[in-house]
Amino acid sequence: MLSSAAAEVDPKTFETDSQESSVSESTKAQRIVIAPSRIDETHGLSAEAQSGQVTEAIKAETTCSKAPDGSSICATVGELDSSALKPHATLPLPKNVCKAGVRSSDRTNGCVGTPLTIKHHSGKGAVLGTLTGTVYVYQYSATNQTRIGNQLTMVISKTTGTGNKFSIAGTSPKCTGNCSRTGSVTSLAGKAMQAGKTLSAESYYNWTGKTTRSSQSLSWNLTVKHPKVAQILPFSYAGASPVRCDKEYKSYSAGCIMTKGQVAIGYDKGPYPSFARHVSEAQKSGLPGKTTALKRLKAGQSSAKNRSKACPSRLKRPSGLSCDEYPFASTQQGAYYGGGAGRTFSKCNIADKSYPVGAKGAKGYSACMIPQKENSAAGSDLSKFFKESRVLTGDPFYVQIL
């Protein structure tokens, strides 16, 4: 049984010069500050066997933009507020991917949940009002389609004082790479940023790549204003992961995936008892694939070389059995390209001094005689997994026994 599944805040600070308007001197003295977040990389595979997520914590930073008369607006991006964690029933986002304070990606979904605090300061530095909430950039794709969704959702948790006067001056989506916008774009221009509100905008893109594969980056630009501040301040939110689209499989439609999303093939012990036992023993002995990713062969590398080294013709094949190798012959960690010595396990029907039972370590490979039909079926499922999950040459993936 085969089952598989597999969505970065751009740390740029934007400052604008004070704009002339018919506001009082006290109004001109006020300022706006937006502090974009910085993200530390922390990778980890989900406990769910068939799919993996990469999550990265968002660290808080504060920056202030000061007008000539001393007034300002300060924004802190990335700092969690307890009220920002309250669930919103109207939030049309996948809860397993979109979470406040982290950037997360699986194979076809990516989401950045960036906590946001904006403060309105007087010319003398006093805090006149605050706004807290979370800004989500959610992007999604499909492994058999080339349309990419890009959504901005702002959840306003609470305001104090003049913080209820903030509004959105404008929003604009962006796709960098081989992509063209399709359909209309939802605009949030003029929307009031009031406590309890959830504001969403969305846009869609079609992949226009002429090569067999290319990566695209999605983002949103957002500008915020306040009636008491003679500034309109822009800032940017980038998507959680580059989106790679390809048309490398002639027998399968083109599609797109999140390059930062991990993916695993899961084999059920039921239909694959001998194969599953071999993979489990190999991984327990230290060979990669469970917690350290395998990688598909690079262009020009040969799976036959891996297979012939792991399962040479001198190894006797009992009737009805065939030689199964691990790591897979289709990977860079296979016997020929990965290097190291061979090993085997009890019940594998291999009596060769070059394949000791009980050897351990991450370097090397294993061989085991298993039913031929089972071996062929497992290999066919691996090929299907590569195609349907768009695991291309050089791509990492995991192997898990369910």
Image (tube, rainbow, N blue to C red):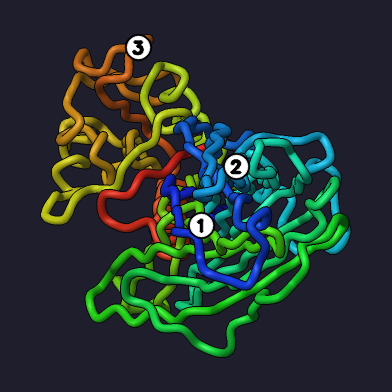
Along the line of sight, which residue is nearer the eye, 224 or 77?
Answer: 224
Where disc 1 sits, the SS reads strand
Which residue has dot 1 on it?
235
Q: CA distance from mark 3 to mark 2?
A: 47 Å
In the rendered structure, which disc, 3 or 1, sits on the residue that comes first in sequence?
A: 1
Q: Residue at x 38, y 78 (%)?
A: 179
- Name the front one of labels 3 and 2: 2
Q: CA distance from mark 1 to mark 2?
A: 11 Å
- Asked whether the residues under the numbered discs 1 and 2 touch, taking CB atoms below 8 Å apart as contact, a structural biologist would say yes
Which residue has dot 3 on it?
360
Using the rendered image of the protein, determine whether residue 11 is visible from the camera's viewpoint.
Answer: yes
Give above or below for 328 relative to 194: above
Q: Amino acid at mark 1?
A: Phe
Q: Position of residue 255 (x, y in %)?
A: 43, 72
Along the line of sight, which residue is nearer the eye, 125 or 8?
Answer: 125
Q: Amino acid at mark 3?
A: Lys
Q: CA distance from mark 3 to mark 1?
A: 52 Å
Question: Crowding at label 2, few (<14), some or many (≥20) Cα neighbours within 10 Å?
Answer: many
Where disc 3 sits, the SS reads loop
Q: Residue at x 22, y 41 (%)?
A: 307
Q: Amino acid at mark 2?
A: Val
Which residue has dot 2 on it?
77
Give above or below for 308 relative to 242: above
Q: Residue at x 42, y 37 (%)?
A: 370
Along the line of sight, which residue is nearer the eye, 384 or 208?
Answer: 208
Where disc 2 sits, the SS reads strand
In the rendered structure, which disc, 1 or 2, sits on the residue that comes first in sequence?
A: 2
Q: Position of residue 24 (x, y in %)?
A: 67, 62
Question: Crowding at label 1, few (<14), some or many (≥20) Cα neighbours within 10 Å?
Answer: many
